[in-house]
Image: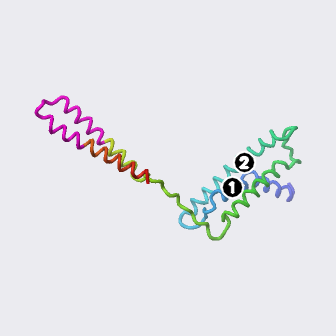
Amino acid sequence: MSVAGAFEAVAGLLLVFFVPGYTVTKAMFPEWRIRGPSGLLRLLEIATLSFVLSVVLTVLVGYVLLVGTPSGFQAYWTSPVLEGALVVVALAAFLVAYFRGGFARVPPAVVPLEPSGGEEGAWELTRGLDRLGREERRLEHELRVRTAGEGPGIQARLDEVRARSAALRAEREGQYAQ
């Protein structure tokens, strides 16, 4: 194999298995950097995502070429249509990544998503309401099986549990309304 053939083979492998996925990864996650304490993990994430996305993009571009051309797509070694299409995809993703700051020395600031009202403490609220519901059912059962003399005390506790449950629901609805 000549030097030119080896260069073409390496360039083709990079184009099919790395470059489009890498540029799309940088476009989607411009803040990812391979520095700091989690640099090795981030490198592994970027490399894996780049490989997988490149393979997916190659398959998708090949399918579009197959369906989109009138005579069908024939993948001949002398016909660089697939490679040209992958270069176009990689350049478009590169431009998006560049303008989003994916290749800047300083990563762009990550804007944290603001939680909407009522998201904090949902698990605790659900557990509390479940606990109050069980207590309410237990007290209702106890009220049915007890004698008339014990009823008023059980009814007072049942009313108290129902009031706490209603207060929790009203408080939560108020948080959602904000």
Mark 2 and mark 1 in contact (Cβ < 8 Å)?
Answer: yes
Instruction: Report the residue at 48% width, 55% height from top.
Output: 115
The span from disc 1 to disc 2 (Cα, nearest Å) is 10 Å
Q: Which residues are magenta?
A: 131-160
Which of 114 and 51 lies nearest the eye of the viewer? 114
Quarter holding the N terminus is bottom right
Q: Secondary structure at mark 1?
A: helix
Instruction: Report the residue at 70% width, 64% height from top.
Output: 99
Q: Quadrant of residue 38?
A: bottom right
Disc with the residue nearer the chain's start (1 vs 2): 1
Q: Residues within 10 Å of mark 2 (few under 14, many from 20)?
A: many
Report the residue marked by disc 1: 24
Q: From the top left corner, tell me how far across and down residue 143 is, in percent.
A: 19, 32
Q: Is residue 43 magenta?
A: no
Which of 93 and 117 lies nearest the eye of the viewer? 117
Q: From the top left corner, tell me how far across and down residue 6 is, in percent.
A: 82, 56
The vertical placement of 72 against 81, above or below, is above
Residue 133 is left or right of residue 88, and the answer is left
Q: From the top left corner, tell me how far across and down residue 102 is, in percent.
A: 66, 63
Quarter holding the C terminus is bottom left
Instruction: Report the residue at 15% width, 39% height from top.
Output: 153
Which of 94 and 128 lies nearest the eye of the viewer? 128
The colour scheme used here is: rainbow
Q: Secondary structure at mark 2?
A: helix
Residue 88 is left or right of residue 102, and the answer is right
The vertical placement of 42 against 163, above or below, is below
Q: Residue furthest left?
A: 149
Q: Is residue 136 magenta?
A: yes
Report the residue marked by disc 2: 57
Instruction: Report the residue at 66% width, 49% height from top.
Output: 52
Residue type pointed to by label 2: Leu
